[in-house]
Amino acid sequence: MRWLGAAFSGVLCLVLLLALSSYHQSFPALGLLFSPYRGFWQNFPLNEKAEKTVPVEGLRASVTILLDSNRIPHVRAQTMHDLYFAQGYLHASNRLWQMEFLARAASGRLSEWIGKATVDFDRQMRRFGMGFAAEHSLHAIEQDSLSRMVLDAYTAGVNAYILQLQPADVPIEYKLLSAVPEAWSNLKSVYIAKLMTYDLSTLNDDYALTAVFKKMGKTVADSLFGSDTYFREPIIPRGITWPFSATVPPVPDVICDTAQIVTDSFVVAERGIGSNNWAVSGRLTASSKPILCGDPHLRLSMPSLWYAMHLIGPDGWVAGASLVGTPGIIIGFNEQLAWSLTNVAADVMDWYRISFRDASCREYRYEQEYRPVHRRVETVNIRGDKAVLDTVLYTHHGPVVAFGEYKPLRSDIPPGCALRWIGHDGDNAVRAFLEINRARSYPEFAAALIFFESPAQNFVYADRQGNIALWVNGKFPLKWPEQGKYILDGSRSDHEWQGWIPREQVPQVRNPSRGFVSSANQWPADSSYPYFLNWIFEVGSRGYRINERLATLQLATVDSMRLLQTDHLNVIARAALPVLLPLLQQKPIKHQQAVQVLQSWNLHADSLSVGHTLFQTWWQELVRLIWNDDFARLATPKTEATLLLLTNGKNRQWIDRKDTPERETLTDIAVAAFEAAVDSLTAAFGVDPMNWRWGKVKQTTLQHSLQIEAFSRRLSVNGDKMIVLAAGRTMGPSWRMVVELGDPVSAWWIYPGGQSGNPGSAQYDAFVEDWRTGRLRRFLLLDPELHRPQAVSFITLKKP
Amino acid sequence: MKLFFGLLVGAVLLQMLLPWWSMAVWAFVLAVLLADRPVNACAAGLVAGGFSWLLPALWLFYTRDHRLADQLAQVFQLPSAAGLFVMAFLIAGLVTGLAALSGAFVRMILLRKHEKPSARPN
């Protein structure tokens, strides 16, 4: 009996201990998690100490940090090394888990944490050549002693924090995953930069368009997927004369390789990444000082990708948004100037069909010769399972991403094709942002831009001397017109990128006569610009609306700029409704009440508006009815092609539906789409139109990376994609900033999130409500040496 | 009572320095040394272990900003943050209860072996 009891209770106890200590298929190890000594209870934040001194190994001298009421750190260091060391330390102390998550996502190492569920994602990132890309850039950075010093210092700062971190204090997500923080490295920072390049420069329709080209012919592809746009408001004002003569490569006899179309099912990625920025000259402002505005739109996450900082070093200060996991300030201002970014989305990735010599895939044809294939073995370690070994074939173009048995998650990756992507080239973003942060005049800023290669950005600029400028800046491949719109032939030298557009010949403008510069990811320049950058850019609606308002501007103030950032007039509806609404009068409509709602709608994508919900749903149905019969499972023509069809009568032949015997008119389609829209809204949200209010239907989500609902935020926000206030369901203005270049420079900002990455902290979502309602906060420019009494908390990092 | 307080104080002190499962080792060892009846040892282990988590958890909850508790209750689909305390008490209690129980049985086995020669003649 005693033996039996001892054995039974002993075994039961051991089994329980084991069960409580192990992480199983995203179910946490409860023993560690619930322990009040090391578990989640320890993540309840303590009241901040007003003053603390932390001895930190690796500093050259002491660094002082003043945290203001927004918990923005104002960091003062005597050397550049210590400044970036402190930045790494602060990033880690606020966002350590997020940093490691981003680096793991970029490098295809999530499965080590999560298990099987993320293996396909990891394999895709690796097959895309993220490691290949990051290693090249790290090499470029480490070749440059200044960049290396900065990145080494940053990494040392992160690791100094990790070293001091007690098990009880590791971020809650580590405890949920039963994981421990891994040492930081320079490579991890580079991976995070590459993740931005991946997000911002790998949108492409090459595969789907090749299918269109093959199935419908070049004429259709040209007319519906061409450069004709409804909104004609390029970034660089029309009528500029380019101060250089360009040599553009000739178009070869074959422009598209259609041999590799093995599917007719494309889910074409919806464009959504877009941002706004502009600068207004002092001539148009109340204070006679230039004002610069920026709001980069990205996937909205909790915590935010941004962490606001004010860095005071030996040669001046810089403030603004830093990207967690990387050194420097990405969007911001200093004592002389300010800058902000929007994405260019030039065509900097192309697919090359590879002809292997034989089934062994050891060589591939290039012109008259065979070239060797290089193999790179990727090992994806998986929690609770054995590792997956993946051999990726590399040609001189780049990796063959989809090949053999492997099916990628993305549907825009053609099988058997090598990827040529700007991200694979070794660039040095550390030096680029270091130089931008240190620039104090227009010539210095322009010189700094040359260091920045990818992902190409529209850099808006303003300074205290009264200059405003905009550069469509990055390293752009020199291409023949429309090169890379379709899949290319990997064996032809004339299908390769033909060099680079000279850096001084990128589209740029300084102090234009209209008194403002702006960009919203639309076409960089009109057709007079000699080089090919891409065949499509973002819908021009935001750029059009911004310029429309800036053109009538007088006596602009910070507040009027804030209101423009939150403008949510739907200019697409403004263009389409005069054509569409009269059509509803021509046939009997079931839903008269809904027609009246649209007729009285003020065209604003207000969160309380039912009109915008109705219009958007109607528009989606209309697009589906016009295009899906012809282009089902191919690339669907974009918004501007639909607008041109409606308003200019171009391409009306597509209106008739091929899948019905009748010959439909635009009226038939518009009415059918309207009825279908109202029916689908009724089915989804009930008959009461109060439940159709836009904010409720859209639900902008700030998503936590582990998809934990309690750590995410769902909000009712004004705006929509393709509208100046571009708050969509998952994407939106990730950082808003208005800077007045007076004496001194003054700045206002907000971002959806908070400075702390701890979901249990009041600082986790402290800025969310102000962001939602379109308010800005003043960027206090405090100095730890001068403003100590204004500190909420004051930290001294002391050399031991 | 001696076992209960020994378990509670020891578990608290050990867990301040060592991983959470050190309390199970302590409960086993202490039960081998002090237990009288297995059922008493098990009860003492359950309550002492449970309190060794419940008390500091309550202290952290009331002295700090505890909004994270509501979020985690949502993650574990508990009706409220109070459920977290119940779970913490049960996890720690079951582990130490079982460890103390097996310790008590082992003590009985050891005692029986030890007592056998002297006990038999009677």
Image (tube, rainbow, N blue to C red):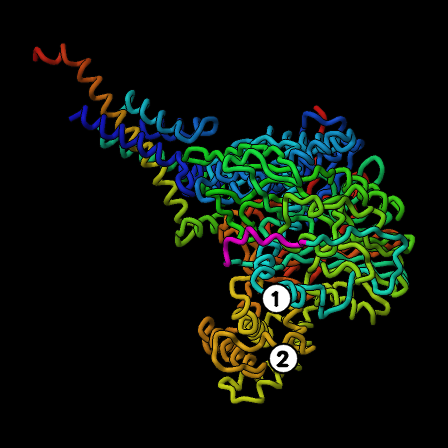
- Tell me, for residue A193, which label it has, or none: none
Q: Is residue A698 above or below residue B20?
A: below
In the rendered image, residue A169, in percent from the top left (x then y), is placed at 54, 36
Check disc 2 and report the residue beneath it. Answer: A601
Judge left or right: residue A729 versus residue B91: right
Q: Which of marks 1 and 2 is nearer the N terminus?
A: 2
Observer-nearest residue: B105 or A223? A223
The image quadrant that residue A80 belongs to is top right
Judge left or right: residue B12 versus residue A161: left
Of all residues, the one furthest to the left in this rendering is B122
Q: Is the magenta stretch mostly helix, strand or loop?
A: loop
- Tell me, for residue A637, which label it has, or none: 1
| Residue drawn where x is 48% and y is 33% of the image | A389
Observer-nearest residue: A15 or A296? A296
Q: Give how far apart the Cα atoms at labels 1 and 2 are.
A: 27 Å
The image quadrant that residue A451 belongs to is top right
Q: Does the magenta stretch include residue A257?
A: yes
Q: What stretch is highlighted in magenta?
A: A254-264
Callout 2: residue from which chain? A
Crowding at mark 2 (Cα within 10 Å: few <14, some 14-19, many 20+): some
Secondary structure of residue under mark 2 = loop
Q: Is residue A606 above or below residue A205?
A: below
| Residue drawn where x is 67% and y is 27% of the image | A55
Crowding at mark 1 (Cα within 10 Å: few <14, some 14-19, many 20+): some
| Residue drawn where x is 70% and y is 43% of the image | A493
For badge 2, the amino acid type reads: Trp
For badge 1, the amino acid type reads: Pro
